[in-house]
Amino acid sequence: MGARWRLRFPDVELRLAGIVPAALAIQLIAIFADLGSDDLFRRVLFIASYLLLIVFVFANVRRPSVALFGVGVLLNFLPIIANGGLMPITPETLLKTGDVPEDARIGEWVSGTKDVLLERDDVHLYFFSDRLTSDLSPSRAFSIGDLVLIGGAMVLLLDLLLPRPYRATD
C-alpha cells in the first residue's frame, strides 16, 4: 500500500509562555488604571512589561515567529527607553488621529495610551516612535515596531494553530 497524506497539529512548546499575558496585563494597568498624576509608576510598568516580553523572546528565540515578534518588541522598547519609559508621539501625529485629549500637555503622558507627548526635536529615535496613523488601527497611532510585533504574533499563532501535512504509511 502507498502512503497517504494526513494532517497533524504541531506539538509546539513555548517556554515561559505565561509571561506574555502577564506583560500585556501590566501594560493594560499602565494605560487604564488610575495611577495618580505622577506618571513615574506608569513608566516603570511599561519598562517592566517590555523586559518580561524580552525574557520570553530570549527563551524561545529559536522559533522564527518568536524571533520576528522579538524584533518588534525591541523596535518598540528602544524608543520607550530612550524617551523615559513611554512611547513618544508628536503633536502633529496626535492631531492626525483626531483623538486629542483635552488635558494633553507637552512632556506628559497622553491619557488612555502608552504615549508621551513630545515636540519632534525632543523625540529620541523618532523613526521608531508612534508616528504612523491609520483609521484601521484601534490606537490610530502606531510604530514600525507595532507592525513587526503584530506580524510576528500572527505568524506565531499560525505556527501554533495550523495543522501540518505529513505522509502516513499504512
Image (cartoon, rainbow, N blue to C red):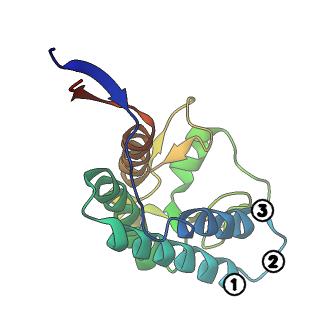
Question: Is the C-beta separation of discs 3 and 1 under 8 Å?
Answer: no
Compared with 113, 22 (above or below) is below
Question: Is the C-beta separation of discs 1 and 2 under 8 Å?
Answer: yes
Q: Which mark is residue 41?
A: 1
Q: Residue at x 34, y 62 (%)?
A: 70
Q: Amino acid at mark 2?
A: Leu
Position of residue 138 measured from the top left corner of the image (x, y, whole percent):
62, 39
The alpha-carbon separation of the residues under discs 1 and 2 comes to 7 Å
Q: Which residue is mark 2?
A: 35
Question: Is disc 3 surrounded by few (<14), some (14 to 19) or many (20+) residues within 10 Å?
Answer: few
Label 1's element?
helix
Q: Amino acid at mark 3?
A: Phe
The alpha-carbon separation of the residues under discs 3 and 2 comes to 9 Å
- Nearest the camera: 131 or 138? 138
Compared with 147, 110 (above or below) is below
Q: Which mark is residue 32?
A: 3
Q: Which is nearer the N-term, disc 1 or disc 2?
A: 2
114 vs 4, left or right, is right
Q: Residue at x 57, y 29 (%)?
A: 135
Position of residue 106 measured from the top left corner of the image (x, y, whole percent):
62, 68
